[in-house]
Image (tube, rainbow, N blue to C red):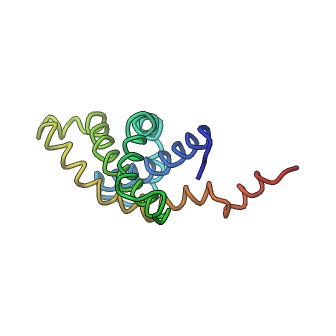
Amino acid sequence: MPESKFGRILFSLCMVIVMVYGMVCYNVVVNTHVFDNSVFLNALHELPIMVPIAFILEVFLVERFALHKASQLVDVKNGVPFHFVIAMSVVTVACMCPLMSCAATLLFKREAVAAHGFLGTWLLTTALNFPMALCYQLFYAGPFVRFLFSGKNPLVRLCRQKA
């Protein structure tokens, strides 16, 4: 994992982009009840709105809290490092999912809010998003982004070689 501040910010940005894109695709399918190739293109339209929101929330609000809570859950010095990664992922999703669902409710669900109220719409959105966000983070997005930043990635090895 990245050790420099720039590396951590780049890692967070990559994770946010991958998570937001996947969750926007999921929400497009949930809202339209259609899963075809257009979903992947339609999801790109929301990225310029949702990625900055998610990045700001992650870097300035959730990251430190998740680090603190994960450190309480897992013995960092004597434990298995992978357990800390899992704890960080779970705590991050537990915080980010309600926050991003709130943002999506405010930005994209005006009709539902008008019909059913903000609280009910937000809670339903969070309940629909949470299982997907947790599974997507643990099984796909997290491993993919960690691979991108690992020594197993041929591009990273190439960049680390001295000229």
Q: Residue furthest front?
A: 78
Furthest residue toward right: 163
> Residue, x 35% and y 49% (percent of image)?
69
Residue 83 in the image, given as x and y percentages of width and height = 43, 63
In front: 52, or 146? 146
Provide residue 60's location: percent of width, then percent of height: 42, 33
Residue drawn at (47%, 45%) of the image = 16
- In this orientation, which residue lies closer to the viewer: 45 or 4? 4
Residue situated furthest left in the rendering: 116
Seen in the image, is 20 located left or right of residue 94? right
Where is 52 relative to 162, above or below?
A: above
Residue 150, image quadrant = bottom right
Q: How many marks?
A: 0
Q: Residue at x 35, y 45 (%)?
A: 96
Q: Position of residue 141 (x, y in %)?
A: 48, 58
Q: Judge by depth and name the residue closer to the eye, 134 or 35.
A: 134
Q: Is residue 58 left or right of residue 159?
A: left
Locate residue 42, reporting x and y percent. 43, 47
The part of the image, by quadrant, that contains residue 113 is top left
